Image: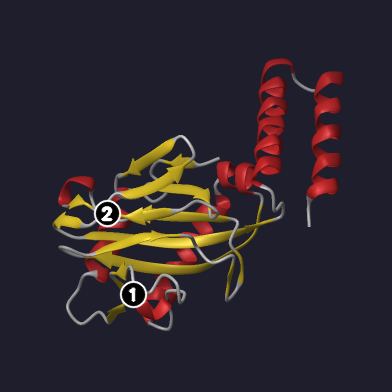
């Protein structure tokens, strides 16, 4: 299951961040420095060092916004959010087809996310392409929007043909490993919330809560 969140960050915040990230003197490093051994040959972008003061200022704000969002809480069941990177992809650059490492330095990668910081009309190309059994999906979102998707998917970033693509990427370790189980729990959680909105607390609501809680105990870590 993949899902999008519109306007995770407000426009004025994204604009201010973009000005800081693209300012002269910001220390952008080759993306290959953070790629796994099998992805270095296809990773052609630049990234901000995690030790950079700007990264250390902005990354916690991304984490806080994501962890506070009710859709992330319900659909991702996050145990920890980790590995954030600010990435810029310029003219002719790309990130070829790859699969994210199962384990990063700070945790398991169950879900990956991309927070778009460039205005959609400010660059061409640079789509995030997810590969599903039924075909591919190319994703270009507005500034401040984020997409979350299973880290098990093969994916790529198409070459940028005009302008520059600026994003923040990272990973979530979920309390539930299985994407199928997370999806079932999300559907149950959605159903009980809708039932509560319609009928208030009822026997049916209590039964759904019981099933949800017991499945979470069974599948959770």
Residue underneath mark 2 = 158
Q: Secondary structure at mark 2?
A: loop
Please provide percent x and percent y for residue 47.
Answer: 33, 73
Position above or below: 85 against 74? below
Residue 31's mark?
A: 1
- Residue 49 in sight: no
Number of marks in picture: 2
Rounded to the nearest angstrom, the CA distance separating label 2 from label 1 is 15 Å
Mark 1 residue crowding within 10 angstroms, few (<14) / some (14–19) / many (20+) = many
Q: Is residue 156 left or right of residue 154?
A: left
Looking at the image, the residue that sits furthest to the top is 199
Name the foreground residue: 81 vs 54: 81
Q: Position of residue 173 (x, y in %)?
A: 63, 60
Q: Quadrant of the N terminus?
A: top right
| Residue at disc 1, secondary structure | helix
Q: Residue 93, can we see it?
A: yes
Query: Mark 2 Cα within 10 Å, few/some/many (few <14, many 20+)?
Result: many
The residue under the point 17% across, 46% down is 121
Q: Mark 2 vs mark 1: which is more N-terminal? A: 1
Q: Quadrant of the C terminus?
A: bottom right
Residue at the (66%, 23%) spot, across then down: 194
The residue lying at 71 percent from left, 42 percent from top is 181
Q: Is residue 209 left or right of residue 92?
A: right
Q: Is residue 105 left or right of residue 206?
A: left
Residue 195: percent from left, percent from top: 71, 20
Q: Is residue 2 above or below residue 39?
A: above
């Amino acid at each position: 299951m993949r899902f999008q969140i519109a306007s995770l960050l407000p426009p004025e915040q994204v604009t201010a961040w973009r000005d800081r990230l693209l300012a002269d003197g910001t220390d952008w490093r080759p993306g290959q420095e953070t790629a796994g051994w099998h992805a270095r040959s296809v990773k052609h972008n630049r990234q901000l060092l995690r030790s950079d003061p700007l990264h250390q200022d902005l990354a916690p704000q991304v984490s806080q916004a994501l962890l506070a969002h009710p859709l992330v809480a319900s659909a991702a069941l996050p145990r920890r959010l980790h590995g954030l990177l600010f990435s810029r992809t310029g003219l002719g650059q790309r990130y070829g087809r790859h699969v994210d490492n199962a384990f990063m330095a700070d945790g398991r990668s169950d879900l990956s996310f991309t927070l778009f910081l460039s205005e959609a009309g400010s660059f061409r190309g640079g789509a995030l392409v997810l590969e599903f059994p039924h075909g591919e999906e190319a994703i270009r979102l507005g500034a401040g929007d984020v997409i979350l998707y299973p880290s098990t998917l093969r994916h790529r970033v198409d070459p940028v043909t005009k302008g520059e693509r600026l994003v923040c990427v990272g990973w979530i370790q979920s309390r539930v490993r299985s994407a199928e189980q997370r999806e079932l729990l999300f559907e149950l959680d959605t159903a009980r919330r809708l039932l509560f909105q319609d009928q208030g607390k009822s026997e049916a609501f209590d039964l759904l809560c019981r099933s949800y809680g017991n499945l979470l105990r069974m599948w959770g870590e």
